[in-house]
Amino acid sequence: MADDDFFDDIYGLETLDETAAHYAKFAKAYEQAMAENGYLTPGRTAAALINSGADMGQPVLDIGCGSGLSGLALKAVGFVTIDGTDYSDAMLAEAQGKGLYRALWQGDLSVPDAERADNYDTINAAGVINPGHAPPEALDNALAMLKSGGLFAFSLNDHAIAAHDYEGRVHMLLDGGWAELLHREYGEHMPGKDLKAWVYVLRKR
């Protein structure tokens, strides 16, 4: 595929339905587009969790799991039990075919998931919390699914950084005592598109 077809306006999508429609259109070609552009963030968040002391024997929730690239990265560093959630049914179908996940479900990061509150020791969100995909409040909603002391790894790419309110939300969570910062590193996100990203790991208090 011409990867520009996939990346055109991806960060300008304004509603979750627009995002879901976009991913449904390109679900079969998504991984090729990401590979062509050297997508590195799933490996970075997975490594950051290990380096921050995550318990690989406990289930990890892969938020915005997409086609399962982040699940592959989590498995590669030693996680055994992986659950996944994504807003796109088409992408979940791609993830299902990999046989990586214990459970997969359609989820909306913009609203709290009361059913899974305080449910996980570890949560991963690689490449999903950014404009056109999930609002800054998704950070709060993800943290709410962690048990006290649990670890949350996520990335904020250059588009999210430019929006300011994403990093502002992180500072609010830290300053408000909801979490403590274990890891923060700026590095390559997608070299083919000249994009970088911060990778964070927070511990829920």
Image: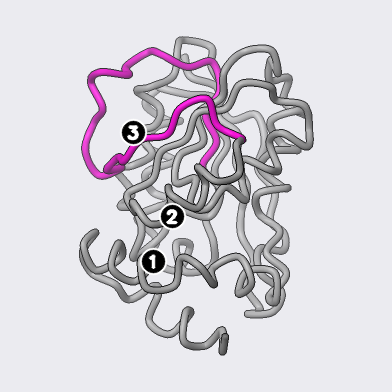
Pointer 1 residue: 23
Q: Amino acid at mark 3?
A: Asp
Q: Marks 1/2: CA distance?
A: 7 Å
Q: CA distance from mark 2 to mark 3?
A: 24 Å
The span picked out in magenta is 100-125
As drawn, is 162 to the left or to the right of 78?
Answer: left
Which residue is found at the position 61% from the left and 53% from the top?
198
Q: Is residue 161 above or below residue 87?
A: below
Q: Residue at x 68, y 22 (%)?
A: 80
| Disc with the residue nearer the chain's start (1 vs 3) | 1
Q: Residue at x 73, y 19 (%)?
A: 53
Circle 2 — which element? helix
Location of residue 142 with respect to 12 vertically, above or below: above
Label 1 is placed on what type of residue? Tyr
Q: Nearer the viewer, mark 1 or mark 3?
A: 1
Vertical placement of 73 versus 28: above or below? above
Q: Nearer the viewer, mark 2 or mark 3?
A: 2
- Residues marked 1 and 3 touching at CB (< 8 Å): no
Is 60 one of the magenta-colored residues?
no
| Callout 1–callout 2 Cβ contact below 8 Å | yes
- Mark 3 residue element: helix
Disc with the residue nearer the chain's start (1 vs 2): 1
Residue type at mark 2 is: Met
Question: Of marks 2 and 3, which one's residue comes earlier in the chain?
Answer: 2
- Quarter of the picture containing the N terminus is bottom right
Q: Is residue 10 left or right of residue 16?
A: right
On residue 91, the disc is 2
Residue 172, position in %: x, y? 37, 37
Q: How far separated are the C-alphas under marks 1 and 3?
A: 24 Å
- Label 1 secondary element: helix
What residue is shown with label 3?
A: 140
